[in-house]
Image (cartoon, rainbow, N blue to C red):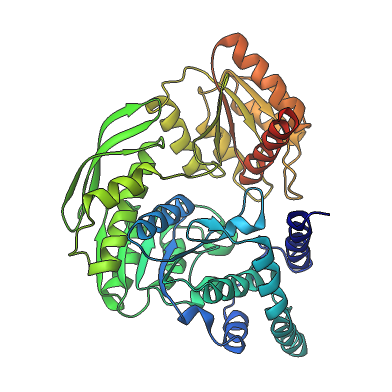
Amino acid sequence: MSTEAFWADKAQSVLDDLLTRIPEHKLRPRLEPTKRAVELLGDPQKSYRVIHVTGTNGKTSTTRFIERILRELGLRTGRFTSPHLVRLNERMAIDGEPVEDEVLFEVWQDIAPILEIVDAELEAEGESKLTFFEALAALGFAVFADAPVDVLVLEVGMGGEWDSTNVADGDVAVFTPVALDHTDRLGHTFAEIAKTKSGIIKPGALVVSSTQPEDARAVIADRAAHIGESFKLYGSDFEAELIETTPLGQRFNLKTLAGTYSDLFMPLHGLHQLENLALAVVAVESFIGGGQQRILDDVLRVAVADLSSPGRLQVINREPLTILDAAHNPHGAHSLVGSLKNSFALDRPVAVLAVLGDKDVRGVLEAFVGVFSDVFITQSSSPRATEAAEIGELASEILADSVIHVVSDLRVAIAEAERKAIEAKTAVVVTGSITLVGDVLKLKQEEADQDA
C-alpha cells in the first residue's frame, strides 16, 4: 500500500468514528457539551480571530469568498464549511487546501481521549454523548490551532445560537439570506429563524448582512444594535452592479463601505453570487479596518478571479453543458431558475433531481414549474434520500408540462439525461440535493480516472 493510500484509509477511519455518533442532521439544541470539549482541549478556538457566517443559502460560497480574499491579503487562513461533497477533509481547509489526511488522523487521535471523557460525563448525566457535528467542530478547532492559522472563516452548521461553532466569538458576524428551511428545529417564521441565527452576534461584533425578508432583517438589526458594534445591509450600505454576463462568468462593479471597486471579473455564474461576493468583501473590510480600509485593487482583482464554489452553478462538462447546483430548498431552487435564465440563457434544459426526506420537496418542485423539458427523478446515496418513485408521483402532479422519468440508478439517470440533452441541443442540470451533487462529482471523477 502506498503512503498516500495508507493515510487515506486513516482519514476514512476518522469519518467512520464520527459516523458512529448521532448524525449531523439530528442536531441537539445545546452548546454546553461542545463548550466542555473545547475547554478540556485548551480552548483552541481562542487562538485565532474568527469571522462567523450564518444564513440559509449561500453560506458556503460566502465563506469561501471571504477566505480567498483574506489569503490574498497574506493571512494564514482556516476555512470550516459543511457539508462535504466528496471527502470529509473538504470541511477543514488551511490556506485554501483541504487538511491533509495525515494531519486529520493525527489530530483526531490527539483529541479522541478528551472527547471520550466528555461522552462519559454526558452519559452519566443521562444525556447523549457528543454528536457527529459536536465532535467535528472540536476536531476542526483543534486542526486550525495546530496549523496555526491567523484567522478562521467559520460556517455555522445549522442555526447559530446553539450551533457547535458558536463556542467561538466572531469579530465579524455575517448573514447570508434567511429563508424557511429546517423549520422543525429553527422555527416556522423568518423572525424565529433569524432569532436563532442572530445568536452568533457577540459583544462588539461588526454585523454585515445580505438582503433579508423584513421580519428577519428587523431581528438581526435589533440584536446588532443591542450587542454588536454596527449593522450594514446589502442594498442600503453596499451593493454589486452587474456589467456583463459571459459564458465564463460575470463582470461587475462593487460599491462597499470603504469605496468602489470597478470592472471586476468572477468565474462564477448567478446574480446571487455577486451579492455573496459583495457581502464577503464588506466582511473583509470590516475585519481588517472596521469598514474604513479599502482592499487594494490588485489584491481583490486576483482573489475574485480565482473564486470557486463547488456544487453551486458548477459547470462540469461542455458537451452536453452540465451544471451542478445544490438547490435543496425552495429559496435555492428559485435562485437556480433565475440563474439558468439570466446567466446561461437556457431554454427548457433537462434536469436530474433527488431530494432528501426532510426537505420541502413540494416547494422545490413548484419552483421548477415551466423550467425543464424532462426531469429524471433519481436517488442520492444518502440514507435520508426520498425514494425516486415517491418524488416521481409528486413531480407528475406538479410538473405537468415536463416529461417525468423515474430512474433510481443514478449512473443510468445521468446517462439518459445526457443523451436527451444532446438530442435536444440543451443542457443537463443536476440539482435538489447536496448529496446528489457530491455523488455526481464522484461519478465523474471515477470516469475520468478510468479514461486516464
Q: Outermost residue, right direction?
A: 1
Q: Quadrant of the N terminus?
A: bottom right
Report x, y in % for residue 405.
71, 22
Residue at left 29%, top 50%? 300
* 192 vs 435: above or below: below
Residue at left 58%, top 70%? 140
Q: Outermost residue, front direction?
A: 2
Q: Is residue 175 left or right of residue 443?
A: left
- Residue 235 seen in this snapshot: no
* 48 vs 449: above or below: below
* 448 vs 280: above or below: above
Q: Work out whether residue 46 or residue 271 is closer to the camera in this orientation and state it.
A: 46
- Residue 317 seen in this snapshot: yes
Q: Quadrant of the C terminus?
A: top right
Q: Work out whether residue 59 or residue 378 is closer to the camera in this orientation and state it.
A: 59
Q: Work out whether residue 67 or residue 234 is closer to the camera in this orientation and state it.
A: 67
Q: Quadrant of residue 341?
A: top left
Report x, y in % for residue 177.
40, 52
Q: Quadrant of residue 136?
A: bottom right
Report x, y in % for residue 53.
43, 62
Report x, y in % for residue 51.
40, 67
Q: Is residue 100 left or right of residue 74?
A: right
Q: Outermost residue, top direction?
A: 423
